[in-house]
């Protein structure tokens, strides 16, 4: 493999020492087939062991290695070093508090994530002897795209509403809630639509569409959010005209 | 990074064990073409606000009598007002095109048993509806119909 040198400018932040994040440059030899994550791992292993970053699978599945690469949210295991110039800036995901170096605080996301009940809600669980809940390919197709989310948080890092409105549920959490609303086995639509009609949820989305632009798995969260808006309104209108609020 | 995000953006429900640095907005925002389009989309709101004030001025004049109303109406022929309305028309077309380009994918997969047509067809239908309504309203305002 051909080898050349590139400079990686990484965000460094040690909560025990640094008042605020700073930048540190590392010039390293890179190979033409490297991803950004390979370069950061090289820096960590060979140059500066104190650099902290998250990663796990290296195959675009775990969603751990999301970072800002030259200002854009990217999965660093998917982003080729060769797509960038001689100097590459790598920062922690935008719109999240920074814990250390390239690591951000995810608890805020996990809290929002849980609030949309991302599981199959059943009024009454089926007994084991009744067999599995069957689903046709067409029923699966209705939500499959939205179930491809790997919770990498790139959509949160790109969203201007997340940056300015702390209570906003955010693209991934809403997309996941919508995914379960579209699931034929689920009976939790009314509960989730009530959440979606609350403050800081689907109607806070101003349709910047950035979440869908940066999503590495083509989940299209902007479509999910805006479909959820539509469904939440239909559900509300139905509750006004149907007997017993449509329940 | 471009600048500070809201200091409480993506804040954990309870403080963590270590101090964190505040969230920042993406560095690509000021220069990225997509974000410029989005910012422009937001800025058109200023024009709509001004149109609202202009409409209120007209309604106010109507309350002061027909002569005052026609004076205000005549003032719209001033080059500054003509330029303002031309800019507003451009803003409306821009917002309309942006909305129609994003709207088809926001369609729910189905409402009851009904499924929407493919996105390109929805897209085309939206333009047909928009153009038809524009022509009908223009004809009404010009006195050609009704």
Image (tube, rainbow, N blue to C red):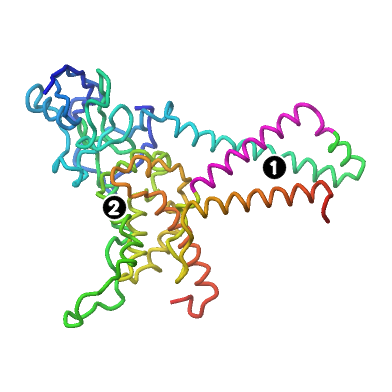
Q: Quadrant of residue B50?
A: top right
Q: Sort mark 2 into few (<14), some (14-19) or many (20+) by Cα contacts within 10 Å.
A: some
Mark 1 element type? helix
**In the image, which residues are magenta?**
B75-102
Q: Is residue B21 above or below residue B104?
A: above
Whole-percent x and y of residue B28? 38, 29
Q: Which mark is residue B52?
A: 1
Whole-percent x and y of residue A31? 14, 24
Residue in the picture at 14% in, 28% down: A51
Q: Which mark is residue A111?
A: 2
Residue in the picture at 28% in, 37% down: A97
Q: Nearer the viewer, mark 1 or mark 2?
A: 1
In the rendered image, the residue lying farthest to the bottom is A129
Q: Is residue B101 magenta?
A: yes
Q: Sort mark 1 into few (<14), some (14-19) or many (20+) by Cα contacts within 10 Å.
A: few
Q: Is residue A222 above or below residue B73?
A: below
Alpha carbon of mark 1 to alpha carbon of mark 2: how far? 41 Å
Q: Is residue A77 above or below residue A121?
A: above
Whole-percent x and y of residue B143? 84, 49
Q: Is residue A155 magenta?
A: no
Query: Looking at the image, can residue A20 be seen?
Result: no
Q: Quadrant of residue A66?
A: top left
Quadrant assignment for the N terminus of chain B: top left
């Amino acid at each position: 493999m051909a080898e050349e040198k590139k400079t990686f400018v990484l965000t460094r932040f040690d909560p025990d020492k640094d008042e605020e994040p700073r930048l540190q440059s590392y010039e390293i030899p890179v190979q033409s087939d490297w991803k950004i994550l390979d370069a950061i791992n090289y820096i960590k292993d060979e140059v500066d062991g104190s650099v902290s970053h998250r990663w796990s699978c290296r195959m675009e599945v775990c969603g751990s290695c999301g970072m800002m690469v030259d200002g854009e949210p990217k999965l660093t295991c998917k982003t080729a070093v060769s797509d960038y110039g001689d100097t590459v800036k790598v920062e922690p995901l935008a719109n999240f508090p920074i814990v250390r170096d390239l690591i951000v605080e995810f608890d805020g996301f996990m809290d929002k994530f849980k609030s949309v009940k991302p599981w199959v809600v059943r009024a009454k669980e089926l007994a084991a002897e009744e067999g599995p809940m069957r689903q046709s390919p067409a029923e699966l197709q209705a939500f499959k795209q939205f179930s491809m989310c790997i919770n990498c948080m790139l959509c949160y890092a790109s969203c201007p509403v997340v940056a300015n409105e702390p209570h906003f549920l955010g693209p991934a959490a809403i997309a996941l809630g919508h995914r379960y609303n579209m699931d034929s086995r689920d009976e939790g639509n009314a509960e989730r639509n009530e959440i979606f009609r609350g403050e800081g949820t689907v109607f806070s989305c101003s349709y910047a569409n950035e979440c869908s632009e940066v999503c590495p798995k083509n989940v299209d969260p902007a479509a999910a959010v805006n479909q959820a808006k539509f469904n939440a309104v239909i559900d509300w209108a139905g509750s006004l005209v149907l007997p017993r609020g449509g329940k | 990074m471009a600048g500070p995000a809201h200091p409480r953006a993506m804040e954990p429900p309870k403080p963590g064990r270590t101090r964190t640095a505040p969230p920042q907005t993406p560095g690509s925002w000021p220069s990225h073409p997509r974000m410029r389009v989005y910012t422009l989309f937001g800025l058109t709101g200023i024009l709509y606000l001004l149109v609202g004030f202009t409409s209120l001025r007209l309604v106010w004049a109507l309350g002061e009598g027909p002569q005052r109303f026609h004076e205000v109406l005549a003032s719209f022929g001033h080059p500054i007002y003509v330029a303002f309305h031309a800019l507003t028309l451009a803003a409306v077309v821009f917002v309309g095109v942006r909305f129609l380009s994003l709207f088809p994918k926001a369609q729910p997969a189905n409402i009851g048993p009904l499924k929407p047509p493919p996105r390109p067809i929805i897209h085309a239908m939206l333009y047909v509806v928009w153009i038809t309504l524009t022509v009908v309203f223009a004809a009404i305002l010009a006195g050609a119909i009704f």
